[in-house]
Image (cartoon, rainbow, N blue to C red):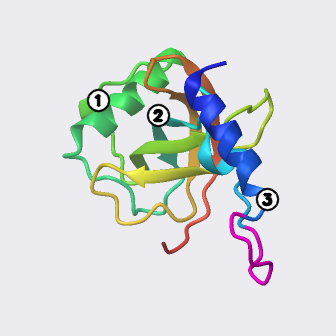
Amino acid sequence: MSSSFKIALALAALSWSPLRADTATAPVRVLIRDIASVEGVRSNPLLGYGIVVGLNGTGDRRQTVFTTQTLAGVLSRMGVQISAAAMRVNNVASVFVTATLPPFARPGTPLDVTVSSIGDAKSLEGGMLLLTPLRAADGELYAAAQGPLTVGRI
């Protein structure tokens, strides 16, 4: 056992007995989870770059170059060849998608994600997030997000 775990165990054992002789004061309970943590167990922040479609004219403007490039790339992978210069993107917005993967998450665990515009879109209301991979700091793919957006105030 590590010395920090022995100390935590000793503190926990002491906390269940009164430290003072007067019994009018309730003993202070210290739980192991309050003073110790399991090494390597933590939540993991996730980040992805995606695109929101279906906006009613409130998306990015034409001068937001990365949105037109992204949309041209998505369409190209689907077999549609179009130049980025020929696109109008006022119904599309480039976004960052963030989430937190909780410790001990299993495949299929639902996650809440936050979608934030990185261009000059006026609103994401009514939009649909296209499939967006979410990666952790180690570069590994841990989740994916897709679906209609709910706009709320923070």
Q: Nearer the viewer, residue 98 or 54?
A: 98
Q: Is residue 151 magenta?
A: no
For mark 3, give the secondary structure.
loop
For mark 2, give the secondary structure.
strand
The quadrant the N terminus occupies is: top right
Task: Judge left or right: residue 22 versus residue 55.
Answer: right
Disc 2 marks which amino acid?
Answer: Gly
Query: In terms of sequence position, does the residue under pointer 2 or pointer 3 come before the other?
Result: 3
Disc 1 marks which amino acid?
Answer: Ala
Q: Say which mark, if any, is on residue 84.
A: 1
For mark 1, give the secondary structure.
helix
Q: How far apart, in angstroms, are the residues tagged by discs 2 and 1?
A: 22 Å
Q: Which residue is mark 3?
A: 17
Disc 3 marks which amino acid?
Answer: Ser
Query: Which x, y percent locates residue 132?
Result: 55, 33
Q: Nearer the viewer, residue 79 or 40?
A: 40
Foreground disc of the pair 2, 1: 2
Task: Judge left or right: residue 8 versus residue 140.
Answer: right
Query: In terms of sequence position, does the residue under pointer 3 or pointer 1 come before the other?
Result: 3
Where does the magenta region start and end? 19-27
Q: Nearer the viewer, residue 22 or 27?
A: 22
Q: Which residue is mark 2?
A: 48
Name the residue located 67 percent from the left edge and 35 percent from the top edge.
103
Task: Judge left or right: residue 5 versus residue 139.
Answer: right
Q: Residue furthest left?
A: 63
For residue 41, what is the image quadrant? top right
- Prevailing SS of the magenta stretch: loop
Q: Nearer the viewer, residue 21 or 48?
A: 21
Name the residue located 27 percent from the left edge and 53 percent from the top edge.
61
Name the residue located 42 percent from the left edge and 53 percent from the top edge.
116
Query: In terms of sequence position, does the residue under pointer 2 or pointer 1 come before the other?
Result: 2
Residue density around tag 2, few if under 14, some if 14–19, many if 20 or more, within 10 Å: some
